[in-house]
Image (spheres, rainbow, N blue to C red):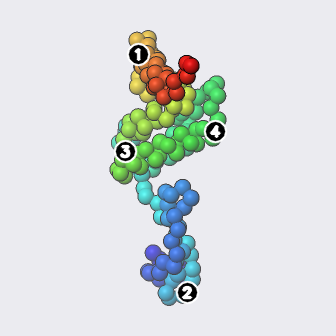
Amino acid sequence: MHCPFCRHGDSRVIDSRTSDDGLSIRRRRQCPECGGRFSTIETSSLNVIKRSGAVEPFSRDKVISGVRKACQGRPVTDADLAILAQRVEEAVRQTGLSQLDANEIGLAILGPLRDLDEVAYLRFASVYQAFESLEDFESSIAELRADHARAAVADDADAPAADTE
């Protein structure tokens, strides 16, 4: 790491701390040549391979803007979208890959969006998965209904039995 003051080619790490979100490390450094102190922030890079083949850095803002269109008119706040984008980023980082196809990012969006708002999920899925007919919508809606039914059965099984004395 070059010193920003004297351009010396080395520096010594004085202190390292993990950021609040745990995605970066802040290091306090000192130049052995001039004694100047400076900070660096280290993050792991995550790149997205677009359909065109172009590679660009992952962006939570792009996730939010893509999902925002599906959420128009729905009771979804900017804070909800920020949390969704964070969940998506955490999911794609857990793959351990430094480069992902844009398609994989879209798939990672579907689960958290479904949890957030099912109508927005259907809108996003209809575009993302290129629904071509009413049957495609009906199939997704049937899947959502089946999940609701399974959840209701699981909730009933977890509920304490009524005392009948």
Of callouts 1 and 4, the N-terminal one? 4
For label 4, count other residues whose C-alpha is less than 10 Å away and answer few (under 14), some (14-19) or many (20+).
few
Q: Nearer the viewer, mark 2 or mark 4?
A: 4
Q: Which residue is mark 4?
A: 78
Q: CA distance from mark 2 to mark 4?
A: 44 Å
**Amino acid marked by disc 1:** Ser
Mark identifier at residue 139: 1
Badge 1: how crowded within 10 Å, few (<14), some, or many (20+)? few
Under mark 3, the amino acid is: Leu
117 lies above or below 12:
above
Residue 35: mark: 2
Q: Secondary structure at mark 3?
A: strand
Q: Which is nearer the N-term, disc 2 or disc 4?
A: 2
Q: Which mark is residue 100?
A: 3
Closest to the observer, 90 or 130: 90
- Distance of label 3 from label 4 (alpha carbons): 26 Å
34 w.r.t. 44: above or below:
below
Task: Say which of marks 1 and 2 sits in front.
Answer: 1
Q: CA distance from mark 2 to mark 3?
A: 41 Å
Gap in angstroms between the C-alphas marked 1 and 4: 30 Å
Quarter where residue 137 is shown = top left
Amino acid carrying mark 2 in the image: Gly
Which type of secondary structure does the marked residue at label 1 adopt? helix
Q: Which quarter of the picture shows residue 101?
A: top left
How many other residues sit within 10 Å of disc 2, few (<14), some (14-19) or many (≥20)?
some
In primary-sequence order, the first of circles 1 and 2 is 2
- Is residue 20 depicted above or below 27 in this figure? above
